[in-house]
Amino acid sequence: MSELTTLESLLEMGFGRNRAEKAVANTGNQGIEQAMDWLMEHENDPDIDEPYVPSEGNVVGGGGGDAESQPSTEQPTAQDMDEAGQQSDFIETEDGSRRPMTEEEKLEQVKRLEELMRVKQAERRERERAEELEREKQRRKQGQELQQIRQKMQDDEMKKITDQRRREKMEDKLARQRVKEKIARDREERAQKFGSGGSQSTAASSQPTLPSPSSPTSQGPPPTKKEYDESRIQVRMLDGSSITAVFKAQEPLAAVRVYVQVNGNTPEGQDFTLLSPYPRHVYTELDMEKPLKELGLVPSAVLVVTKK
């Protein structure tokens, strides 16, 4: 009865010849268990299924005395594996002698090796599963850290936009406050001026008028045209209501528009312009920079608010 070698045992268990030959060669024909361990460790090698090529000079039974005197460090050939594998198919008896394995003992050995292979495969799958779980944990951790960084960047950007809007609102509020204060100062100045002028005119009217001496040879100069330094502006709003204010003759028309924006009832953000009804004239942006006197709006005028 022929005995199974290590190589044949691996082939019988379903391993390919190239893999089996490499396993036996790389373990030095130390037995089936060592060969199986090597196969389990190297089953994912890219060249695992390529044909086994023995090293040069590794010829069984060849060479002279020099070759026999020096230990060979080369890997064995397939023939060497078959010959050396014969030893693994013998068992040692109680009296120290060696006898061939029976068919039942070989089957038992194959079953034991297959069970060992299943155990090792299960251990490897468990190890790979644990490594995959660890990689997944690291990936999720990195994803969470990246999400936190993105969220922080978004929060910082929103805070920056909010601060910018707050500053713009504050600047707009301060600008409106300055306009209101200027209008209040102008009103106060006009009230003081008109009040002092009225008292002076009252005192002058209380004094008796004296006949002016007439010169037989000369007459007085002709009366000059009165110069007005203020203008009374009445503005009709979009809803038909009107507001009235007094402005300096040299103030630009833009001051009237600002006054309407602050004191009128136009909706916030509503863009409008001014026009004169008689004769009809729509004022442009260039007109807004011109003084009221230059536009012929002194000493009084009526303007109408109209949508752009």
Image (cartoon, rainbow, N blue to C red):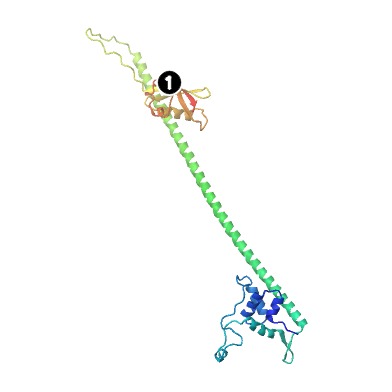
Where in the figure is residue 47, as x and y percent of width and height?
Answer: 60, 72
Q: Residues within 10 Å of mark 1 (few under 14, many from 20)?
A: some
Picture quarter containing residue 103?
bottom right
- Report the residue that reaches farthest toward the right: 104
Where in the figure is residue 94, as x and y percent of width and height?
Answer: 74, 90
Q: Which element type, helix, strand or loop, lies under badge 1?
A: strand
Q: Quadrant of the N terminus?
A: bottom right
201 sits to left or right of 20 = left
144 sits to left or right of 222 = right
Where in the figure is residue 184, as x and y percent of width and height?
Answer: 43, 29
Picture quarter containing residue 202?
top left
Question: Label 1 sits on what residue type?
Answer: Ala
Q: How many marks?
A: 1
Where in the figure is residue 272, as x and y percent of width and height?
Answer: 48, 28
Give the residue pinned by disc 1. 301
Residue shown at the point (66%, 85%) measured from the top left: 83
Q: Nearer the viewer, residue 49 or 272?
A: 49
Q: Nearer the viewer, residue 185 or 100?
A: 100
* Vertical comparison of 215 with 251: above or below: above
- Report the residue that reaches farthest toward the top: 216
Residue shown at the point (51%, 48%) measured from the top left: 157
Q: Nearer the viewer, residue 228 or 280?
A: 280
- Residue 153 visible in the displayed image: yes
* Vertical comparison of 283 with 201: above or below: below
Residue shown at the point (35%, 19%) measured from the top left: 200
Q: Nearer the viewer, residue 280 or 191?
A: 280
